Image (tube, grey):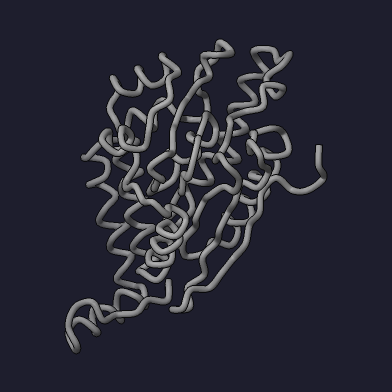
């Protein structure tokens, strides 16, 4: 195994001065989720959580996004060790990714299997190339997807679609995923489109985007009534932000769409 890190995390600044982080799966040809990939992602997400940018792009290099999990990770595990593995991956990868207080965009340019797709489902927006394919194929080793894939797919596509997707272990194309509401949009040059979208979101009202994520998370965990109950405080706090005050003044003085944001 190479000593080269399996991921690459860089930070860039948009023309408007907003910081964007680009997290790349960088262990081709298959970008397998082996222990080195998992360790690298844990490290990267800890860094992003400690110092969040104003938007994140998650992408991959190579012919595929990921060929899935290296099955050696599962070999010989007891039931207690298996449960501990999933608890760790939720705590150190999936939940930190979802909790980032900024928009997170996932770009799928090719085959996106198992853990990579489960990470995509934890992002805010998924973009795909026309030839991208998606699969949760854990049934080939007698397993069910256990990094949140079934439940997050059910949230986007419905429980019947999620059952079909997981139980058949089939591959589904980008057009089908878009029809189901899992993929937000399909682009011929998905890397360019994803970067443009990430930059655009980064230059927006970052605190308001974080509030949107909080409100939707409240809905996910407790339904509309729970989301309604947290919205006054979550949204009310935005009136104490420089971005909202500046945008309101801009709207009143020069009209809509002219405000600039700093993320504060």
Compared with 70, 131 (above or below) is below
Image spot of residue 105 (x, y percent) = 43, 52
Question: Left or right of 241: which side holds 43?
Answer: right
* Image quarter (top left, top right, bottom left or bottom right) of the N terminus: top right
Question: Left or right of 86: which side holds 250?
Answer: left
Image spot of residue 211 (x, y percent) = 34, 57
Image spot of residue 141 (x, y percent) = 59, 13
Q: Nearer the viewer, residue 215 or 1?
A: 1
Image spot of residue 38 (x, y percent) = 66, 38
Q: Which of 25 and 90 is in front in this view?
A: 25
Q: Return the residue found at the far bottom.
A: 253
Q: How many marks?
A: 0
Q: Which residue is drawn at 51% across and 46% down?
A: 97
Q: Residue at x 57, y 42 (%)?
A: 63
Compared with 158, 7 (above or below) is below
User: Which quarter of the figure has residue 247?
Assistant: bottom left
* Image quarter (top left, top right, bottom left or bottom right) of the C terminus: bottom left
Q: Which residue is drawn at 36% across and 43% down?
A: 217
Q: Which of 122 and 13 is in front in this view?
A: 13
Q: Nearer the viewer, residue 46 or 116?
A: 116
Q: Residue at x 33, y 35 (%)?
A: 177
């Amino acid at each position: 195994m190479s000593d080269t890190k399996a991921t690459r995390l860089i930070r860039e600044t948009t023309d408007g001065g907003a910081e964007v982080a680009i997290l790349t799966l960088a262990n081709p040809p298959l970008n397998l989720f082996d222990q080195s990939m998992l360790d690298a992602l844990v490290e990267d997400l800890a860094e992003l959580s400690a110092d969040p940018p104003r938007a994140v792009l998650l992408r991959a290099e190579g012919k595929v996004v990921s060929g899935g999990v290296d099955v050696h990770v599962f070999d010989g595990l007891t039931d207690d060790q298996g449960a501990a593995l999933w608890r760790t991956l939720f705590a150190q990868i999936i939940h930190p990714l979802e909790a980032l207080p900024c928009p997170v965009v996932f770009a799928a340019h090719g085959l996106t299997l198992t853990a990579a797709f489960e990470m995509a489902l934890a992002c805010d927006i998924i973009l795909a190339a026309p030839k991208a394919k998606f699969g949760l194929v854990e049934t080939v080793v007698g397993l069910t997807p256990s990094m949140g894939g079934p439940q997050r797919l059910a949230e986007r596509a419905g429980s019947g679609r999620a059952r079909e997707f997981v139980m058949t272990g089939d591959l589904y194309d980008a057009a089908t995923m878009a029809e189901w509401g899992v993929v937000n949009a399909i682009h011929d040059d998905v890397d360019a489109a994803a970067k443009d979208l990430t930059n655009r979101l980064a230059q927006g009202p970052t605190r308001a985007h974080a509030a949107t994520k909080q409100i939707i998370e409240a809905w996910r965990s407790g339904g509309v009534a729970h989301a309604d109950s947290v919205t006054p405080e979550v949204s009310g706090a935005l009136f104490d932000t420089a971005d909202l005050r500046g945008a309101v003044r801009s709207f009143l003085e020069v009209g809509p769409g002219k405000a600039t944001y700093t993320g504060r």
